[in-house]
Image (tube, rainbow, N blue to C red):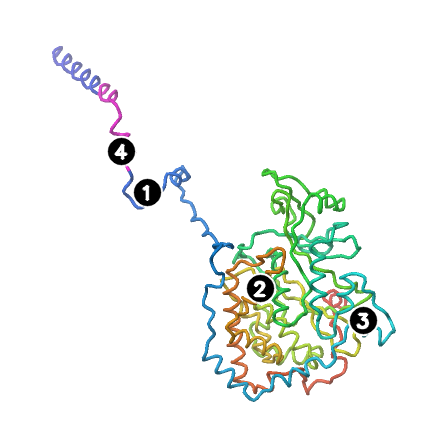
């Protein structure tokens, strides 16, 4: 018995000693095993990617793709995309409108284009001062277009870009950051600072009413409006400012309090507004230079009054009820728009179509109101093309609902149609003409080049919708200079609609 116990003790000691020897051996094999490149597909990652993996095993989301470069290449043509028009569609359009004398119709579009200066001189014997580029612009505001003299506008744009700034104030009533610049000549303009680079695309999950405003959209839309021959957009130019000497030093007290230096040592500000005016959404210089758009103030309403009207094609601005009536009823124009006094006679319905054609080309969904000058008494007023800060947000998507006024009403000005079909059929495209116009701006390039094929794509769709109108409606009823509804009396058709606040008070 004692012998067996001794044997068991000896065996246990031997096993224990062997284990200690094995544990004390070099771990070269284990090291080689980890150093070898893993053979699984999941493991075929770079060293940096392996280091960045979550130690708890949770997989990371794939990174967002890098957007197309604004610069692409210094030697690459920004127009290296296909812009060929649809020859079958062109032939169809020419055939459907062959009996229409567009040039004859053009003569009736603006029967009396008088400037504000001439109108006041003839009706009230008033003389409008023209001491600077602002006053020259104001005095030349016309009854058919915002401006007609390009030299006056070019000088105004130069002054907006270069004239020294005297005061900077926060613009009241804005949903996002806007400043009012008062220049050394005591004239004013609106400044929208650059928040993102040219390549930034709107988040598809964001609603149009919560999207960020883009300064370059205001500049580009002014040029596109000019290229299309509307000339109803407010003159806007790019400007690069020194945030210390031109903003902070000239800022009002409550604006100065919002300036700070970021951890990257860039000079930033928050300002005050309804949306995105907080430290998380601060606007920073590089390190203290900031680009933005400068848009001239329209004449004070006490001197040159304006009418403010809600668009009948206003969206719901609701997260729950996202579709408005006009987006679901193709008879909406016939039953709800053409029967309104404001649109039943005159130019206003055609102004609305022009406005939405412009909005469609720039991708602007945020059209809720429009304004018009109320100063030319008996002469019909036009819709001013204002507020395009949320345009050019998506280059990969077209919201065809923006064109529903055209598709439902099936009316268009002969001049608008002529301009569109010329750009659609000619070798020199709309986007190339726009690019040449914007290249004169000091902040050029204004748009990321990816927006050029988007403009051409939308133009093609627009022409297709026009062909649909010509197919179902005689061309002479589509190409009109004024619209008249025989079922609606022609008196007081230009009266101002009540605002939302006025309607709430009545209720």
Distance from the alpha carbon under mark 1 to that under mark 3: 76 Å
Local SS, label 4: helix
Distance from the alpha carbon under mark 1 to that under mark 2: 50 Å
Which residue is at the far right? Answer: 125
Tell me the crowding category of disc 3: few under 14, some 14 to 19, or many 20 or more residues within 10 angstroms, Cα based: many
The answer to whether the residue labelled 3 contacts the one labelled 4, judged by CB atoms less than 8 Å apart, is: no
Distance from the alpha carbon under mark 1 to that under mark 4: 14 Å
Please give the residue where the numbered disc 4 appears in the rendered image: 33
- Residue 396: image x %, image y %? 49, 62
Magenta stretch: dominant SS?
helix
Q: Which mark is residue 436?
A: 2
Distance from the alpha carbon under mark 4 to that under mark 2: 62 Å
Q: Quadrant of residue 254?
A: top right
Q: Earlier in the sequence, mark 3 or mark 4?
A: 4
- Residue 303: image x %, image y %? 82, 66
Q: Which mark is residue 227?
A: none
The answer to whether the residue labelled 1 contacts the one labelled 3, judged by CB atoms less than 8 Å apart, is: no
Please give the residue where the numbered disc 1 appears in the rendered image: 43
Q: Quadrant of the N terminus?
A: top left
Q: Nearer the viewer, mark 4 or mark 2?
A: 2
């Amino acid at each position: 018995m004692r012998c067996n116990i001794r044997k068991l003790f000896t065996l246990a000691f031997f096993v224990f000693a062997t284990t200690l020897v094995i544990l004390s051996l070099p771990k070269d094999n284990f090291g080689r095993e980890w150093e070898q490149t893993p053979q699984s597909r999941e493991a075929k990652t770079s060293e940096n990617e392996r280091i960045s993996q979550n130690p708890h095993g949770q997989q990371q989301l794939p990174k967002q793709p890098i957007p197309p470069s604004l610069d692409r290449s210094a030697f690459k043509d920004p127009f290296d995309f296909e812009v060929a028009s649809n020859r079958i569609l062109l032939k169809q359009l020419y055939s459907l409108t062959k009996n229409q004398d567009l040039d004859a119709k053009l003569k009736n579009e603006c029967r009396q284009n008088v400037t504000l200066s001439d109108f006041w001189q003839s009706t009230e014997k008033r003389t409008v001062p023209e001491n600077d580029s602002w006053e020259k612009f104001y005095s030349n505001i016309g009854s058919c277009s915002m401006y007609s003299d390009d030299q006056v506008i070019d000088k105004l744009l130069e002054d907006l870009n270069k004239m020294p700034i005297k005061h900077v104030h926060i613009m009241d009533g804005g949903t996002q950051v806007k400043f009012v610049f008062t220049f050394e000549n005591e004239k004013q303009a609106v400044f929208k600072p650059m928040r993102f680079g040219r390549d930034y695309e709107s988040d598809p999950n964001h609603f149009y009413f919560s999207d960020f405003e883009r300064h370059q959209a205001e500049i580009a839309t002014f040029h596109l409006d000019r290229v299309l021959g509307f000339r109803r957009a407010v003159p806007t130019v790019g400007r690069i400012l020194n945030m210390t000497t031109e903003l902070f030093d000239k800022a009002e007290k409550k604006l100065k309090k919002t300036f700070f230096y970021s951890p990257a040592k860039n000079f930033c500000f928050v300002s005050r507004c309804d949306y995105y005016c907080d430290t998380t959404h601060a606007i920073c210089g590089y390190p203290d230079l900031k680009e933005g758009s400068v848009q001239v103030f329209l004449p004070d309403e006490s001197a040159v009054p304006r009418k403010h009207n809600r668009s009948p094609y206003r969206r719901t601005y609701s997260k729950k009820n996202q579709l408005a009536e006009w987006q679901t009823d193709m008879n909406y124009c016939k039953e709800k728009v053409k029967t309104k006094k404001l649109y039943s006679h005159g130019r206003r319905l055609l102004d609305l179509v022009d406005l939405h054609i412009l909005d469609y080309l720039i991708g602007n969904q945020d059209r809720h109101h429009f304004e018009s000058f109320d100063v030319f008494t008996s002469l019909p007023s036009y819709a001013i093309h204002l507020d395009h800060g949320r345009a050019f947000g998506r280059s990969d998507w077209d919201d065809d609902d923006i064109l529903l006024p055209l598709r439902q009403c099936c009316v268009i000005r002969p001049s608008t149609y002529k301009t569109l079909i010329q750009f659609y059929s000619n070798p020199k495209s709309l986007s190339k003409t726009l690019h040449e116009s914007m290249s004169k701006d000091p902040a050029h390039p204004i748009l990321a080049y990816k927006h050029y094929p988007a403009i051409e794509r939308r133009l093609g769709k627009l022409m297709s919708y026009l062909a649909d109108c010509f197919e179902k409606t005689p061309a002479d009823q589509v190409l009109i200079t004024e619209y008249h509804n025989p079922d609606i009396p022609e008196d007081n058709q230009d009266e101002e609609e009540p605002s939302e606040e006025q309607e709430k008070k009545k209720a």
